[in-house]
Amino acid sequence: MAVTTRRVQDLTVEDHTITVPLVWGDGADARTIDVYAAVVSRDGGETLPYLVYLQGGPGHEAPRPFHAPSSPSWLDAALEHYRLVLIDQRGTGRSTPLGDADLGRGTDELVEYIAHLRADSIVRDCEAMREHLGAASWSVLGQSFGGFTTLAYLSTDAGSVREAFFTGGLSAVGRHPDDVYALTYDKLRSGSERYYRRFAHHRDTVRRLAELAAEGAIVLPDGEVVSVSRLRSLGMLLGSNNGWQTLYELLETPPQSNAFRHDLAAALPYSARNPLYYVFHESSYADGYATRWSADRVEPSDFRDDVTLLTGEHVRREWLETVPGLAPWKDVTLALADHEWPSIYNVEALRASGARGAAAVYVNDLYVPLEFSLETAALLPGVTPWVTSEHEHSGLRQGDVLPHLFDLAHGRRVR
C-alpha cells in the first residue's frame, strides 16, 4: 500500500493507493486492481472526520484538489468540517484505469472484467479504503452516479456511513431502466421547449444543423461525421446551471467555421477520453435488469419526428458506427447491453439503514428524474430532502448547495 504526502496551494494531499480484489465476495479469484484516493485537508484540519466523495459517471475519476475556480468549487465548504477523500472509482483515473489498451483482452474477457466495475464493487473498495485509513465510519457525498453508489453503500454497509449527502443522486430503486429513460425524455422535452422560449431563433438553427448532419456535412477535427442523433445530444448542456450559455454560443457560431467544429467536439457528450462512460452508462440504471439499449427503445415518437427536441444522457447504438473513438468498443458494448445485471439496491436494508443526512433533489433534473428521486427519498426518512428549482443537475458546483446540505443535516437552519 503506497502513501505519499504533498502540498497543493495551502492544502495537504495524501496520495493513497491500495490493492484490492477485482472480484469481491463469491467468485473471488487471484486478480487484483489498484484503487487510488487523495485525502485532502487544510492546515488545522488534519484530525477532522472523513468525508468521501463519490463522483458522477459512471466512468469518471474524482476531481483533483485545487481551490476554485480550478476544481472543485465546493472544496472549501467541505474542508471546513471534514478531511476530504477523493476516490478514483475502479476503472478510472489512477485506479487501474480502463482504456483502449484493454481491448486486446478480447470481448468475452473484457465484458466479464467490466461487469466487476459496478457500484457494488465500488462500495467494497470504499470499505477497504476506510479500513486502510483507520476510520470506524465516515460520511459520504454522492454526486449523480456517486449518489447511486451511496444507495448501494447503504444497502450493504450502512453502519460505516455516519452521514449521507446526495446531490442529484437519488436513483430510482427497483424500477426498470425503460421507466427511467422514458421519464428523462419528458424532462428533455420540457428543457428543450424552455430553451426555445428564451431563444426562439435557435430552433431554426438546430433544424438547419440537423439537415447538415443528415447530409454528412459536419465533420469534427478527429474525423467524426456527426450524425443527427449526436448533434441532438447537445441537450446534455441543458442539464447544468450554465450549460445553456455554451449551447447558445455554439448555435451562434457559423457552422462552416473551425471554431464551430472544435467547440462542437468539446461540447458533445461521451467522448473517447472515458469510454467507460458510454460503454457502461445504462448499467447504472439496471437494478436487476438487462438494458438492451433502453434509451433507444423508449424514444417517444415526437422525438423521432422533431429533430429540434434535444436529447441528453441517452446513449445511442448507432454511435458505435459513427464515433471513431467508440467504434473499437462495439462488440463489448453490444454484449454489455444484453448482460443481466443483478439487483443492486435492497429496499428493506435502505429502510432499516437509519441513514442520516440531506439530499439535493432538483425539480428540473434532466438525468435523475424528480419523481423517482422522491420515491427513493421516502425510503430514507433520516435524509432530509431539499427540493429546489434553483439549480440544475450540476448544482453541487455552485457555492451554496453543499453548505445548505450540511446545515439541513445538522439542524442549523432551514430555508
Image (tube, rainbow, N blue to C red):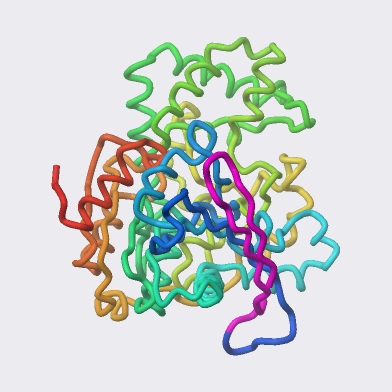
Is residue 16 rendered magenta in the image? yes
Direction from residue 133 to residue 104 in the image, left or right: right
Residue at figure coordinates x 54%, y 34% from the top left: 70
Direction from residue 405 to residue 22 in the image, left or right: right
Is residue 255 rendered magenta in the image? no
Q: Is residue 112 above or below residue 317?
A: below
Whole-percent x and y of residue 270?
A: 62, 43
Q: In which image quadrant can residue 176 be found?
A: bottom left
Residues shaded magenta = 1-24
| Residue found at the very far bottom of the displayed protein | 26
Q: In which image quadrant can residue 195 be found?
A: top left
Nearer to the camera, 78 or 3: 3
Whole-percent x and y of residue 259?
A: 67, 15
Nearer to the camera, 348 or 134: 134
Whole-percent x and y of residue 396?
A: 38, 43
Nearer to the camera, 279 or 384: 384
- Check the picture and name the quadrant holding the N terminus: bottom right
Q: Is residue 248 above or below residue 243?
A: above
